[in-house]
Image (cartoon, helix red, strand yellow):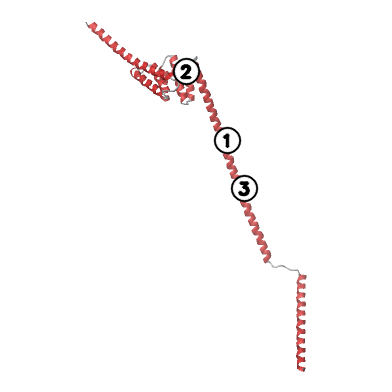
Amino acid sequence: MKGFRYLFYIFFLLSVLSAHAQNERKFVRQGNKIYERALADTTKLDTAAFSRAEVAYRKAIEKRPDDLKWNFNLGDALYKQMNLEQAKSVFEEIAQKSTDKAEKSKALHNLGNSLLMQNKLDESIEAYKNALRQNPADLETKYNLVYAMNLKKKQDQQKKDQNQNKDQNKDQNKDQDQNKDKQEQNKDQNKDQDQNKDQQNQNKDGQQQNQQQQPQKISKENAERLLQALQNDEEKIQDKVKKAKAERAQERKTEKDW
């Protein structure tokens, strides 16, 4: 009787575990169906459907958190919703925990995709390289690696061109500043020249005024001539005065006799 009872307990325990496993797989199957239907619709990205798939996967993972395959499906659902940082964390954890090369390679490939969508090119390139180390024959990973490397090359060239343009602009601004300084120097020189001209004009005017104020000097001969002319004029005047007096005296005599 005791042996039968123990067998009954074992059978009951196995039945309970089997029921739990079926419930977990039910959530996974449900999530897979939603995911596949959303993936089949190529006309749009149905993020709402991928979100429902995420919910189903998380319900299953609550019971079996270490199931890498279910976590992989969760990472895919997050990636399709563009929850890139969360997807990146999931794929990183799978790549660290997985011991299967093929499984690790797929996780690293999807990790590279999550990083590439965030424009983290150096990290995505490294993830693709690590994926190829696990599975060198994966053509899709090779293609994504080449794509990421070309994109990185273009971005580096753009940055280089931008830096060159900045340097050219700096040189142009420097030349413009130098030209401005030269113009200012020329203005100062012109100002000094104008001041010198004003000073020269003032000196010239002063000299002219001094020349006007200074008495003109005459030679000795001219002075003697001028003096002789004045004497001659004086003699003529005196002669005229004498004649006038004589005429008046004659008139007086005449008047008396008459």
2 and 1 marks in contact (CB < 8 Å):
no
- Name the kind of residue labelled 2 in the image: Ala
* Whole-number angstrom distance, CA of label 2 to CA of label 3: 69 Å
- Name the kind of residue labelled 1 in the image: Gln
Residue hosting label 1: 168
Placement of 252 over or under 215, stated as above or below: below
Q: Which mark is residue 199?
A: none
Q: The residue tagged with tag 3: helix, strand or loop?
A: helix
Residue 221 percent coordinates (x, y): 78, 70
Answer with the quarter of the image where residue 238 lies: bottom right
Residue depicted at x 58% and y 38%: 172
Mark earlier in primary sequence (2, 3): 2
Residue depicted at x 65% and y 59%: 203
Residue 26 percent coordinates (x, y): 34, 15
In the visual, does 245 lie left or right of 140?
right
In the visual, does 104 lie left or right of 152?
left
Mark earlier in primary sequence (2, 1): 2
Q: The residue tagged with tag 1: helix, strand or loop?
A: helix
* Whole-number angstrom distance, CA of label 1 to CA of label 3: 27 Å
Residue hosting label 2: 131
Q: Nearer the viewer, residue 223 or 57?
A: 57
User: Which residue is at the far front?
Assistant: 43
Residue hosting label 3: 186
Q: Quadrant of the C terminus?
A: bottom right
Mark earlier in primary sequence (1, 3): 1
Q: The residue tagged with tag 2: helix, strand or loop?
A: helix
Answer with the quarter of the image where residue 4 lies: top left
Placement of 186 over or under 249, stated as above or below: above
Few, some or many residues within 10 Å of mark 1 (<14, 14–19, 20+): few
User: Which residue is at the far bottom?
Assistant: 257
Q: How many marks?
A: 3
